[in-house]
Amino acid sequence: MKPNQDDRRDNVEKIQYNIDSTIKNMNLANEMISKTDNPKTKQELEAKNKRREESLNNMRSEIKDEAQARENNFK
């Protein structure tokens, strides 16, 4: 069996969707942090947001690469 071709035409949109979702989750976590009195919950949410920020940086780099590949017709 032959593997499916890698279809990169919509990668920019998929990555942008993931960026938007991650930002939304970070904002929701920040709201929870401001509302909770539980130090353990605050610490866990802050750690999650730190990982999300790292992911955002990676996704932003990836979206630039994908946009450039699209401009170059994926060559």
Image (spheres, rainbow, N blue to C red):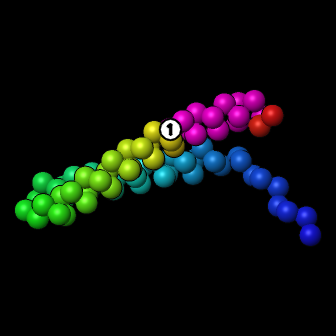
Looking at the rendered structure, the number of numbered marks drawn on it comes to: 1
Magenta-colored stretch includes residue 70: yes
Quadrant housing the N terminus: bottom right
Quarter assignment of residue 37: bottom left
Residue occupying image coordinates x 38% and y 44%: 53
Asked whether 54 or 20 is in front, the reply is: 54
Q: In this view, does 29 lie above or below 61?
A: below
In terms of image quadrants, where is residue 36? bottom left
Q: Position of residue 15 (x, y in %)?
A: 55, 48
Name the residue at 63% across, 34% down.
Answer: 65
Residue type for callout 1: Arg
**Is residue 29 visible to us here?**
no
With 73 as the anchor, is 44 left or right in this view? left
Give the prevailing secondary structure in the magenta stretch: helix
* Frontmost residue, 14 versus 47: 47
The one nearer the camera, 58 or 31, is 58
What residue is at 75 percent from the left and 52 percent from the top? 7
Percent x, y of residue 66:
64, 38
Of residues 29 and 9, the one drawn nearer to the viewer in this rendering: 29
Label 1: which residue? 60
Dot 1 falls on a residue whose secondary structure is helix
Q: Is residue 22 left or right of residue 43?
A: right
Q: Which residue is drawn at 51% across and 43% down?
A: 59
> Magenta region: which residues?
60-73
Q: Residue furthest right?
A: 1
Question: x, y (%) of residue 24?
Answer: 34, 53
* Quadrant the C terminus occupies: top right
Residue 27 visible within the image:
yes
Q: Is residue 69 left or right of residue 40?
A: right
Q: In the picture shown, does residue 19 fall above or below 1?
A: above
Residue 36 falls left or right of residue 27: left
